[in-house]
Amino acid sequence: MALDGDLAMGLLDGKVAIITGAGGGIGRAHALAFAREGAKIVVNDLGGSREGSGSDASPAKKVADEIRAAGGTAIENHDSVATAEGAGSLVSAAVAAFGRVDLLVNNAGILRDKSFLKMDEALWDAVIAVHLKGTFLCSQVFARQLVAQGGGGRIVNTTSVSGMLGNFGQANYSAAKAGIYGLTRTMSIELQKHRITVNAIAPIAKTRMTEDLPMFQGVDTLTAEHIAPAVVFLASDLCGDRTGYVLAVAGARLYAFKVVETPGRFKETDNGVWKPQEIAESWDAIIKA
């Protein structure tokens, strides 16, 4: 059922959507937007702190209650995406409740920022586990379910500007998000034959995760609600067979990230073997787009 307006047909009518990290911020905005378009929602959130510690069932329940109160269909789920057991249990819960799955939004994440020289292994492992490993685990078990069902489906991952461009103090987060970009590209290639599209968003929004960062001070135009419509598009039939893209959203601005290959320069002599000195001399020509 579509929310707030009793629309006869929503973009996601009849679809079952799993949204991880949906207990607040961008994930909550996704869940509400998907429900408004007629999807049945599995609101997943462990309910931990921004740094990933602890757990709390109330954030996921609150969002699920919000959807149900508005006339939509939702269940809450508190499994951890960072373990194979949690990812499997999450998809199993969706199938048990609704009989199938159609859409997955990998949104769950934590922050443990520290400059590169001060970062320790625990800080690195925790962020990689939730972002990159969690995206892999949830996507794999979800895709296996889609293949078993037949009929295809859609996965939307979450990378970031930090992952695409880097950012001071976020070596762990940037590496995880860059990994998600590579994972998205490979998944899009391998899963295309199963009619599963795999795209990603790179959102910039003021949320609990980012509200204390300098770039968001005094800013009210970069909201989670700006992000959700792009994810609805990527999860809907409007997306068509587009796959392997990274759609960035920063307030009113939509743009795409692409890895570009420069024309480069060919060595015509010495059997094509470059000397280090020649690379230095030709550097500008090699990197020119």
Image: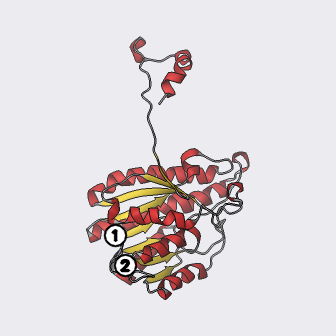
Which residue is rendered at x = 63% and y = 72% of the image? 48
Rendered position, 274 above or below 224: above
- The total number of labels drawn is 2
- Residue neighbourhood size for the residue with mark 2, other residues' Cα within 10 Å, grouped as few (<14), some (14–19), many (≥20): some
Pick out the residue farthest to the top.
269
Which residue is rendered at x = 69% and y = 47% of the image? 116
Residue 103: image x %, image y %?
38, 69
Q: Which quadrant would the N terminus be assigned to in this image?
A: bottom left
- Residue neighbourhood size for the residue with mark 1, other residues' Cα within 10 Å, grouped as few (<14), some (14–19), many (≥20): some
* 66 or 192, nearer to the observer: 66
Residue 108: image x %, image y %?
54, 66
Q: Quadrant of residue 260?
A: top left
Report whether 145 appears left or right of 48: left
* 96 or 209, nearer to the observer: 209
Q: Identify the residue under disc 2.
A: 95
* 267 or 256, nearer to the observer: 256
Which label is found at residue 19? none
Q: Quadrant of residue 205?
A: bottom right
Which label is found at residue 145? 1
* Residue 82 in sight from this viewpoint: no
**SS at badge 1:** helix
Q: Amino acid at mark 1?
A: Gln
**SS at badge 2:** helix
Q: Earlier in the sequence, mark 2 or mark 1?
A: 2
Label 2 – label 1 distance at C-alpha = 9 Å
Rendered position, 165 above or below 268: below
Asked if marks 2 and 1 touch (Cβ < 8 Å), the reply is yes
Report whether 280 appears left or right of 257: right
Q: Amino acid at mark 2?
A: Val
Residue 253: image x %, image y %?
52, 54
